Image (cartoon, grey):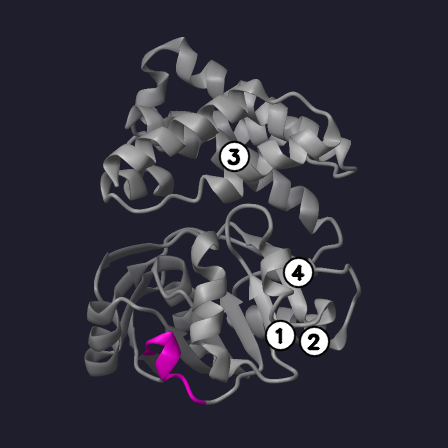
Amino acid sequence: MKIAILGAGAMGSFFGGRLAQAGNAVTLLDIDEAHIDHIRRDGLRLSTDAGEQVVRNLFAQRPEEATESVELIIVFTKTMHTEAALTAASAVLGPETVLLSLQNGLGNAERLSRFATPERVMIGVTTWPADKSEPGRVSSHGNGAIRLMTANGHRTSALDRTVAVLNEANLACRADADVWAAVWEKVAFNAALNSLCAVTQCTVGELTHTPDGESLALKIVAEVTAVAHARGIAADQAHVESNVRDALAHHGSHRPSMLQDVLAKRRTEIEAINGAVVEAAASAGVDVPYTAALAGLVRLVETRTR
């Protein structure tokens, strides 16, 4: 399959590397010149539990440099960059191109639907871990999986083929009609830990220095899952709470992406996570004071640092 990865950070590069190793024609599209140049010159160094390999049978370029349409675009950009990135990469969008979002937050289906018909838009979540230690080098250790479905919930041949291609790359993918529950569960997890760490500049483990950290995180989880339930989505609050407690106990030194953005004086994804939950809560008539407060605080921190 001809595949473009839009947003070739840690996750995008890991997915692109695995898909290229499985024999697909993969192009990484990103604006990180050092990363692109390294891959062009020396290949992508991919470190997994199987060891380190250099993947050379893939291309890397800026989005606006792409000239040929592809069959599948997997979108990993930050939510606020989606439309600009797809506009820049318009040459890869053909009349049958399928768009798959594996991004954080809410509203991704709506953003992608501005560039493709609903039956060609897919939404998914993934638990694969990935880190980029330096240009041209990514690692992923441990297992992961992918759950995805078309944005309109219809089972299509394109969906089945996408699942098959991802499985051929050993990425453990399955079509799941309940993917929206998984999306909201991930949003609840990120709304809790990302926003708290961004405001306090604590690592995940440092949130446990007082009982307030875990208490606030779990209150946000409860609010977000309540909004999901009001919208008819069966997000599992207990499952998210278990994941939050596990992260607090075992991911002590981890700096969530929103904290990394604050420290690097970049825009955060607060609007697609806490902000989007607050908006959905208002339309559903659900009160979310903790989630709203953290959204406002992250906006203040972001504005000051930028």
Q: Quadrant of the C terminus?
A: top left
Disc 2 designates what residue? Answer: 158
Disc 1 designates what residue? Answer: 98
Mark 2 or mark 3: name the one nearer the start of the chain. 2
Residue 182's image quarter? top right
**Pair 3/1: label in front:** 3
Count of labels shown? 4
Q: Amino acid at mark 3?
A: Asn
Disc 4 designates what residue? Answer: 174
Q: Amino acid at mark 1?
A: Val
Please state the extent of the stretch shown in magenta in the rendering. Answer: 61-67
**Pair 4/1: label in front:** 1
Q: Amino acid at mark 4?
A: Arg
Q: Can the viewer see residue 191 in this picture? A: yes
Do callouts 2 and 1 mark residues in contact (Cβ within 8 Å)? yes
Identify the residue at image location x=52%, y=40%.
Answer: 273
Identify the residue at image location x=55%, y=55%.
Answer: 145
- Label 3 crowd bin: few (<14), some (14–19), many (20+), radius 10 Å: many
Mark 4 or mark 1: name the one nearer the start of the chain. 1
Disc 3 designates what residue? Answer: 274
